[in-house]
Image (tube, grey):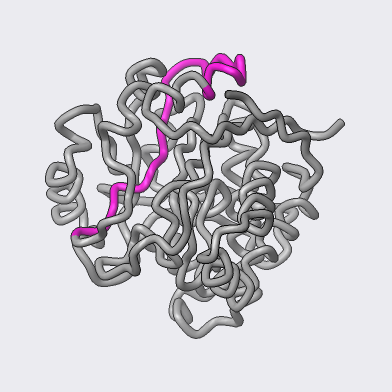
Amino acid sequence: MKSKVYFTKTITPQKVLQMYRLLDKELPGKVAIKLHSGEVGNQNFLRPDFFKPVIDAVGGTVVECNTAYEGERNTTEKHLKTLALHGWSEYFEVDLLDAEGPDMVLDIPDGKVIRKNYVGKDLAKYDSLLVLSHFKGHPMGGYGGALKQLSIGVASSYGKAYIHGAGEPEKIWTADHDSFLRSMADAAGSIVEYFKGNAAYVNVMKNMSVDCDCCAVAEDPCMKDIGVLVSLDPVAIDQACLDLVYASDDPGRDHLIERIESRHGVLTVEAAAQLGYGSREYELVEVD
């Protein structure tokens, strides 16, 4: 059976909540809400007020992890300040999963490149997961969506270096690029397995720059907003977003596609599908 992906062209905070409810998925217990806190200086990340209705309705905790590169989010002290500066800790309960070590280590027995995933130890507090992704380009991954949030997003600072280095953290910026992309698919699969179906995904195709929200200096969006997608399948939702970009007649789409293709972005989706925790085959259900 094809995975269902719901899609609307309407992009409002209330619509995000309505779309999430279409999934008819009860997220049990304590819910981790993974999103991107935004690097200081970035103009494109989605703010707390945009996600407030869905976060309030779910009643979860906003979770993040420290970065593995220089900036205002690479230490616990700086990241907590950024979470406050950007309003996340003002509106919501916030948990920096790797604020303190040691990391939780998840085994990836079927991993094609990496066999372990290092995540913030506080992940153990949560029973289910809601991933709120801002779909856009990315300087290394080609694009950022649900699979990147599951992999790099949930990984600890060390875990991010481990994924980037395809199992050799000291090669964070020099590892074989395609191996890095496959490592993201491996790591994302370990999070899907950890929550055993108790997860849901929202991708927002708004403010679509070729750069990620992790860039302090990012290009402005290059194409018009497309919409909001929700699914229970992280592979299908990312594939649907890519397909919508390719189907767009917006003149800026070619710039975003060049970023995606030059970084082999679709390889992460292909590798994730091969691992079997999602499908590139989906039914797109458009709603008003």
Considering the image in quadrants, where does the C terminus appear?
Answer: top right
- The segment highlighted magenta reads 19-40
On screen, residue 227 above or below 232: below
Quarter of the figure with the N terminus? top right
Q: Residue 104: tell me if it is visible.
A: no
Task: Pinpoint residue 121: horizontal percent, then vertical percent.
Answer: 39, 43
Q: Residue 222: say if magenta.
A: no
Dividing the picture into quarters, in which one does residue 209 lie?
bottom left
Q: Which residue sits at x=73%, y=64%? A: 112
Horizontal side, residue 196 vs residue 66: left or right: right
On the rendered structure, is 88 left or right of 13? left
Magenta part, dominant SS: loop
Q: Is residue 83 visible?
A: yes
Q: Residue furthest bottom?
A: 174
Give the image quarter of residue 258: bottom right
Res. 184 image quadrant: bottom right
The x and y percentages for residue 83 are 20, 44
Vertical placement of 78 versus 96: above or below? below
Q: Is residue 191 shown above or below 91?
A: below
236 left or right of 73 in image: right
- Total tally of numbered discs in the picture: 0
* Residue at image coords 49%, 19%: 18
